Amino acid sequence: MEIETLRLFVAAAERLNISAAGRSLGLAPAMASARLAKLEHELGAELLHRTTRKVSLSQEGAAFLPYAREILAQSEAARAALGLNAERPTGTLRFAAPSSFAQLHIMSLLPAFHVEYPDITLDLRLSDTRMDLIEGSFDLALRSAPLQDSSLRGRKLGDDTRVLCAAPEYLGRRGTPKTPEDLDGHDMLSWGNAAPRELLAGTRRFTLDPARMTCRTILDDGTAQRIATLAGGGVSINSLWSVAHEIRAGRLVHLLPDWRLADASVLWLIYPRSNVLTPKVRVFMDFLLARLTPAPWLP
């Protein structure tokens, strides 16, 4: 299998357009179709379903796609090891990140990245629901969690500190909790996993049990939770990177600041252990680390 033909297949699978994929690689539509047909003949499988109206990825093509990307990644790394293409990383980088974090801290950085690396295309998949890094064929992902999966590697971006907060308008109606016990009966904006959480203050411990609070709203999106809290919907647990600017501006109040949530969550930039660290992934990681460490949202 030729590397350039694999590159063509990956481009066609991402665009679902053989002609556009061919043009991106300097090939006429007829030549692009012929090369893909030859690849399918070599593999003995139809990778792309073609009709007069559209192109779609076959089941075999979907299974083959991660391996094609891996071969291309290995090829890029091998060339980089020889000093080839070292100055101009190229290709499409598939990056998964929480939508809330990306909106606040990554999207505004992208124009500067594209100026510095004009030959890299960023394929961003943003969702506060965690995506599978391996099955999704992602090159890189931002994840907030302890890094426990042995199939992944990563670099720490920063601690993901969680805080309790509420809007001044809500506290004016319901009162400001001075102790953890004062949270009983308060309205709470909750994530789907409303499990008890432990609060710590030195040697003191307190179990924050959402069942002892009134929870009428459950959310799975950090931006929506911040907006609902700002609107006076109740007490919520938020990542500090999400609400720090609102706390500084006085639009939210950090509750029980002497207490902290017992949470070991960390912001990681992670990539599959089986993947070599290609030039495009390395420069994007370095770019984000240079601008987001130390964390710009901290006091």
Image (cartoon, rainbow, N blue to C red):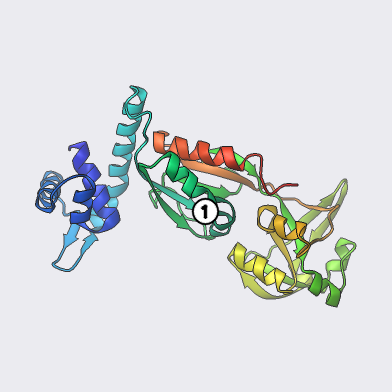
- Residue 252 vs 25, above or below: the answer is below
Where is residue 150? Give x, y as percent: 51, 39
Looking at the rendered image, the quarter that the N terminus falls into is top left
Q: Nearer the viewer, residue 156 or 79?
A: 79
Residue of label 1? 107
Q: Quadrant of residue 207?
A: bottom right
Where is residue 6? Give x, y as percent: 22, 43
- Residue 83 vs 229, above or below: the answer is above
- Residue at the farthest top position: 82
Q: Is residue 11 left or right of residue 77?
A: left
| Mark 1 burial class by Cα count in 10 Å: few <14, some 14-19, many 20+ | few
Where is residue 297? Give x, y as percent: 68, 49
Q: Is residue 194 left or right of residue 94?
A: right
Where is residue 292? Give x, y as percent: 60, 43
Q: Is residue 199 left or right of residue 32?
A: right
Please, what is the three-letter code of the amino acid marked with disc 1?
A: Met
Q: Secondary structure at mark 1?
A: helix
Q: Residue at x 13, y 67 (%)?
A: 52
